[in-house]
Image (spheres, coloured by chain):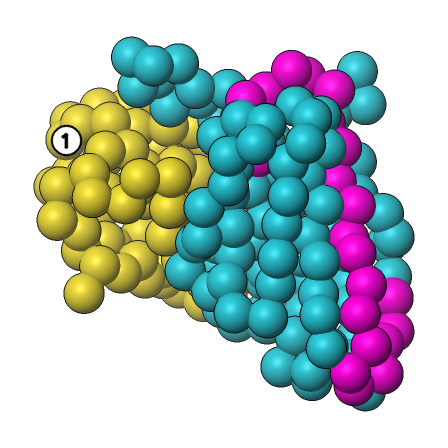
């Protein structure tokens, strides 16, 4: 298994440009997450999904959009990039059952995004 | 406000010198506390989940413990390969799928 893969690894955007960060997992996990990590700060949840077709906002969703059309893929869309979106973005996935088992999150390698 | 703090911010140890990392949390009903290891330029890697006060878990040189207000990650006789940033995260009963992460402790183990 490749686990959680993310593309691209690095990207530089100009203010106002848009882009999509790709995330794919091959573990058949139902939950997927997008986080951002800024220096000296903890990971902040942007959006998450509990299954195909179902997404919800996390702590810092402004400026981002997501969709989940398949179990495997969970792309993150940045519209009108701003310098405040300069960060490292991590995608993660986990498997949780209706009984509430909280299995660990598996993280991708991250995408380092700079907005100039 | 629910929050997670970690101390120290950075820790430098000699190989074999045991120590502990602290994770203090304030949440309205703890669902689970998680420890992750993060190497530079990589995503976090899961270490432990603790659910209730008094619980302990071990993995090689690492042992995690949990009280009602904090968790400790004890590192016994560390090796240089244990150098990494260690992250603590909590999930509260009212968070749904939102996990609150601490800023991490950057551990360096010198040979």
Who's the residue at 30% across and 58% down the image?
B4
| B69, above or below A73, in the image | below
Counting from the top left corner in percent of width and height, residue B80 is at 68, 44
- The residue drawn where x is 74% and y is 20% is A26
Identify the residue shown where x is 69% and y is 84%: A83
Quarter where residue B66 is shown:
top left
Q: Residue at x 65, y 23 (%)?
A: A71
> Can you identify the residue that label 1 sits on?
B53
Residue B73 occupies which quadrant of the picture? top left
- Examine the structure image and report whether residue A29 is included in the region drawn in magenta: yes
Q: Which chain is cyan?
A: A
Quarter of the image with the N terminus of chain A is top right
Q: Find numbered disc 1 in the image and state the secondary structure of the residue it sits on.
A: loop
On screen, residue B37 versus residue B63, left or right, reads right
- Looking at the image, which is closer to me, B72 or B34? B34
Chain B, colour shown: yellow
Q: Is residue B90 left or right of residue A76?
A: left
Q: Nearer the viewer, residue B69 or A79?
A: A79
Q: Is residue A14 magenta?
A: yes
Q: In screen coordinates, is B110 left or right of B14?
A: right
Q: Which residues are magenta?
A: A11-32
Q: Does the rendering let one see residue B104?
A: no
């Amino acid at each position: 298994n490749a686990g959680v893969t993310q593309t691209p690894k690095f990207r530089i955007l100009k203010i106002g440009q848009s882009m999509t960060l790709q995330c794919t997992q091959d573990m058949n996990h139902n939950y997927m997450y997008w986080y951002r990590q800024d220096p000296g700060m903890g990971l902040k949840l942007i959006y998450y999904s509990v299954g195909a077709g179902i997404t919800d906002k996390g702590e810092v969703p402004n400026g981002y959009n997501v969709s989940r059309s398949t179990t495997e893929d969970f792309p993150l869309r940045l519209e009108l990039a701003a310098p405040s979106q300069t960060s490292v973005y991590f995608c993660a996935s986990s498997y949780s059952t209706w009984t509430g088992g909280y299995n660990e999150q598996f993280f991708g390698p991250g995408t380092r995004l700079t907005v100039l | 406000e629910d929050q997670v703090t970690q101390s120290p911010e950075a820790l430098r140890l000699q190989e074999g010198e045991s120590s502990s990392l602290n994770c203090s949390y304030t949440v309205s009903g703890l669902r689970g506390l998680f420890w992750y290891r993060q190497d530079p330029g990589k995503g976090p890697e899961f270490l432990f989940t603790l659910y209730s006060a008094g619980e302990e878990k071990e993995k090689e040189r690492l042992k995690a413990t949990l009280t009602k207000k904090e968790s400790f990650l004890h590192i016994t006789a560390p090796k240089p390969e244990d150098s990494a940033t260690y992250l603590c995260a909590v999930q509260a009963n009212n968070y749904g799928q939102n996990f609150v992460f601490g800023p991490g402790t950057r551990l360096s183990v010198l040979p």
